Image: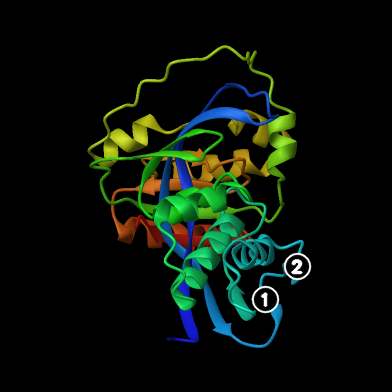
Amino acid sequence: MNVFVTKESPAKINLILKVLGKRDDGFHEIASLMQRIDLHDDMSFALAGQGIALRCTGIPVPENSKNIVYRAAELFMQKTGRPSGVSIEIEKRIPTAAGLGGGSSNAATTLLALNELTSAGLDRDTLMAMGASIGSDVPFFIYGKAAWAFGRGERLEAAENIPPISLLVCNPGVPLATAEVYGNLRIGLTNEPIQYTIPRLQTVQQVARALENDLEEVSESLCPAIRDLKTSLADLGALGVLVSGSGPTVFGIFETREDVLAAGERLKTGMGVPFVAGAGSL
């Protein structure tokens, strides 16, 4: 049995995010097209000692039960009785409180890694159900491919034929809490069920034209720098520009990887944007 494993923990973007209504549990009913991207954190796991030891480098995050990774490991140990101890290291590259799902991805990677290391044999559906209990986006990262997310994000359907996407990811360096964004959402939501028709998206141009986020206006009001990023990306030739999730990260879809690199250089050197990264879809 292996006692050590390393894994990449990818970020995500929301190509479409529709808020369809309120739920009795306090969450919102959504329909969202979610895509993993190759911007990632590096994580390592070692079976060692007793309990959970968590260490993080790069972007500062908590190293205790305030970190969703700790809670994911704790949940796995409670459910399976194993391992007796684990040491987890995270090299953080994905901005936090950014709409990129970094914490949820880390939690999902933790569940997958511990299932592998301990030979617990839990199937994907079981791991996804565990993930849903600690974060709405965690099941998506366990699912492991582009998907439509429904409910509060835990019900997933494969998104077929989504083309490879080259994009530039930009963050103004101002964290935005998801709860704050949803708390300021005012679009006349009801508890009545709403039908949503899934669009067919088979070319990059179709994806770029379909970009939509019902949270974008709220995110912009809480973080005005978002508007400047959107304008800059459009001026640099992006086919489409959108806030990811609850923001404040903004991404632009470009025709080629070369276009991404050229635009990224302009934003970094000419405009001083705090975080700029080229990425591709996974």
What residue is disc 2 on? Answer: 62
Protein image colouring: rainbow
Q: Looking at the image, which is closer to me, 234 or 18?
A: 18
Q: Looking at the image, which is closer to me, 58 or 141?
A: 141
Above or below: residue 244 compared with residue 29: below
Residue at 67% from the left image edge and 76% from the top image edge:
56
Disc 1, disc 2: CB below 8 Å? Answer: yes
Q: Quadrant of residue 89?
A: bottom right
Query: Which numbered disc, 1 or 2, marks the residue that appears first in the sequence?
Result: 1
Residue at 74% from the left image edge and 28% from the top image edge:
184
Q: Looking at the image, which is closer to me, 215 or 113?
A: 113
Q: Position of residue 217 (x, y in %)?
A: 62, 29
Q: Position of residue 261 (x, y in %)?
A: 39, 62
Residue at 28% from the left image edge and 37% from the top image edge:
205
Question: How many C-alpha atoms fall within 10 Å of the one at disc 1: few (<14), some, or many (≥20)?
Answer: some
Q: Position of residue 258 (x, y in %)?
A: 31, 61
Residue at 52% from the left image edge and 38% from the top image edge:
153
What residue is disc 1 on? Answer: 56
Left or right placement of residue 280 versus residue 131 in this view: left
Secondary element under disc 1, as helix, strand or loop, is strand
Question: How many C-alpha atoms fall within 10 Å of the one at disc 2: few (<14), some, or many (≥20)?
Answer: few
Amino acid type at mark 1? Cys
Note whether residue 67 is visible.
yes
Secondary element under disc 2, as helix, strand or loop, is loop
Quadrant of the drawing holding the N terminus? bottom left
Residue 164's disc is none
